[in-house]
Image: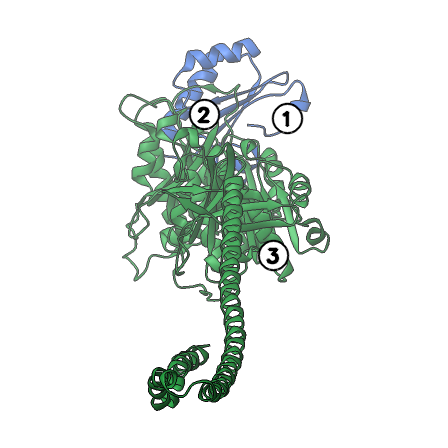
Chain colours: A green, B blue
Amino acid sequence: MAKRKPAQTALAKVATGFKGFDTMTGGGLPQNRISVLAGGAGSGKTLFAMQALVHGIKSSEKPGIFVSFEEIPASILDNFASFHWGLADLVANGQLLMVDGRWDADTVLSGNFDISGLLAAVESAARAKNAGFLVLDGIDALLTMLPQANDPRRELVRLQAWTERLGLTTLVSVKAPGNSTPFSPGSHFEDLAMYMADCVVILERSATDTISSRNLFIQKYRGSNHAQNKVPYVIGPRGIEVEPVEPRSGGFEVFTDRVATGIDELDTMLRGGFYRGSTTLISGSPGTAKTTLAATFAEASCLAGERGLYICFDEAPEEIVRNVASVGIDLGRHINSGKLHMEGFVARSSSADLLTSQLLNLLASQQPGFLVLDPVSAFNLSGGDNLSYNAVRLIVQHCKQAGVTIVLTSLLDQASGNTEMSKAHVSTLCDNWLHLSYVINGGERNRALTIVKSRGTGHSNQVREVIIDSSGVSLKPVYTEQGEVLMGSLRWQREEQGRRQREADKQAAERRYRDALRATDDIAQRIELLQRELQERRSDLARIAEESSALEAQDEEQRKVMGELRRNASEDSAPGGGSRKGRKKDSSDPQAVSKPGKPQIKGRDAKSPGTGRSS
Amino acid sequence: MNAGNPCSQGGAARKLIFYIAGSGFFSRAARANLDALVAELGTGTDIEVAVIDVTQAPDVALAKGIFTTPTLVADLGSAQLRFVGDLSNREKVLGALRQAL
């Protein structure tokens, strides 16, 4: 056996065309060496092998040979025709040679044998065609016919030596150890194959309940570094797609502009809306208007000129269009104008990996600006927690790289306790998380919205009541009373109560103003009356003073007359008494007359100017 | 293996074609087994015996689907039998051939 050539600076590798796989292996399968592909039934071994072969043929222009040990070559070609690889053309122009290596059921085993015939035949064909690739699909079907325990090892060594001599990149697929019957106690043929091969790829298919998932990992790769983890792969309309292990970090644009949510109040709460290219989770119990919110966003984005993709799982697109039309959201018009593409997936009938692949293909063909997955929890139905997480992660990564704004709705089942936690931990993938819930009080069920998180946004911490009416969705602030949030008619009541209170306060103030005004008017009127009275009294006073001085003058006159009369009647006795009185009165007369009158007048005079001034 | 058999049309012609790979010990032992088998079948039977080395005629192996060596193809006109192995299990082969003859 020829010794292996000294190691080259870098191991030559042949790309398989599976992006994720080529990333994992740093280039693909080892060139001119044997790789073993092991997997259980339905894991896609034949598909993987054929797809890699076709890619090898197309990318290198070197023909390839496919030897099938289990399936009829024509059936393989038929089966894979739906992938549109152009297999029929490759066969027709001689670039792909299909060889039927099945063991005939009527064949009688008459002793020991080897696979020299196979190697001779393939070598001849390979040399004639200058082939670069060989697939031996399900070679275990042939080698397990060997009668003795050590025979397969012998044939594998033969195969290995032959491959190296010929310089043919060979992919051998075998059934996975766990899924096949042991060839002999303690020695699985597949184990032997794996020890011999330079590169071993394991394909796994696991199914629990109705959930099926596929994973790939690289068990060994001689002389090469490779990814260690299990990586999901899907079988989609174009064949196998292997999820890239490492996302291309930093390779995508990060946007700072915002996309309107369609609800003004929510835009305010989010400081202007969602970031373009961000992922938003709308979670909530059934009937909390997740779809309505998502549809509102879709409509607003379409109106802003974005192209969108709306994938619904629980309902048919037509149903959603009809239902949201009842709250004033017109998606039909955007579908007709080609801005919005709606597609209904049936989650239960396909696995999460298939959904992912379908979705990625739609994203590739539609090139939307935004994506709505309603609900993303549908992935939970079609995959385990891990699978659905991976599926969603893959979609989110893809969209981030493409700058697609995503809105995911997620059903939370309160009965199972997932009140604020999404099953697939999707929330950790999301930049924004809006949670919708019910608040029951006052005999009502009302919808409440909170922003659980919003990366890169100083968002509001307030609970808002979601109001849905024929004009769409709006948010209203809620009342909190002794730690209880008031919504619905209680909120309305509270608002009404407040309005009435304000009204009453206003009226009371007006009344107080009027009272005060009236009081001042009253006083002013009273002052006027008093002034008038004062005036009258003054004129009275003047009149009285006149009268009294007139009386005095009259008195004087009378006295004079009386005096004269007395002087005339008796001059001796009467005038003495009278004269005394008269003298006294005479001497003090001017003073006596003025004194009784004047002080009175003065006193009144002194008072009246004072009151007059005060008015 | 589903290779067509051009000789079956001959009707009377009965043919044993023995495919071997190279001339190593294994091939020689197998040929010895074949000779013993033919001898045991009886000299009276007019069976044509041919030995084809697939390493010399790989195209024939490819065309006829002879991927295991040694392989004995018995074209008995009425039936075609295929025996894979070095014919060390002679009784089994003889039984099958006699039944077909």
Q: Position of residue A56 (x, y in %)?
A: 50, 52
Residues A303 and A22: in front is A303
Residues flagged by tags 2 and 1 on a common chain = no
Q: Position of residue A496 (x, y in %)?
A: 54, 47
Residue at horizontal 53%, vertical 81%? A543
Q: Position of residue A388 (x, y in %)?
A: 44, 39
- Residue A167 seen in the figure: no
Q: Which residue is mark 3?
A: A300
Q: How many marks?
A: 3
Q: Amino acid at mark 3?
A: Ala
Q: Please name which of the two marks, 1 or 3, marks the residue nearer to the observer.
A: 3
Q: Which residue is mark 1?
A: B7
Q: Chain of mark 3?
A: A
Q: Amino acid at mark 1?
A: Cys
Q: Amino acid at mark 2?
A: Asp
Give the numbered dot on residue A319: none
Locate residue A84 relative to residue B36 in the image: left or right: right
Residue at horizontal 55%, vertical 52%? A371
Secondary element type, mark 3: helix
Q: Which residue is mark 2?
A: A209
Q: Residues within 10 Å of mark 3 (few under 14, many from 20)?
A: some
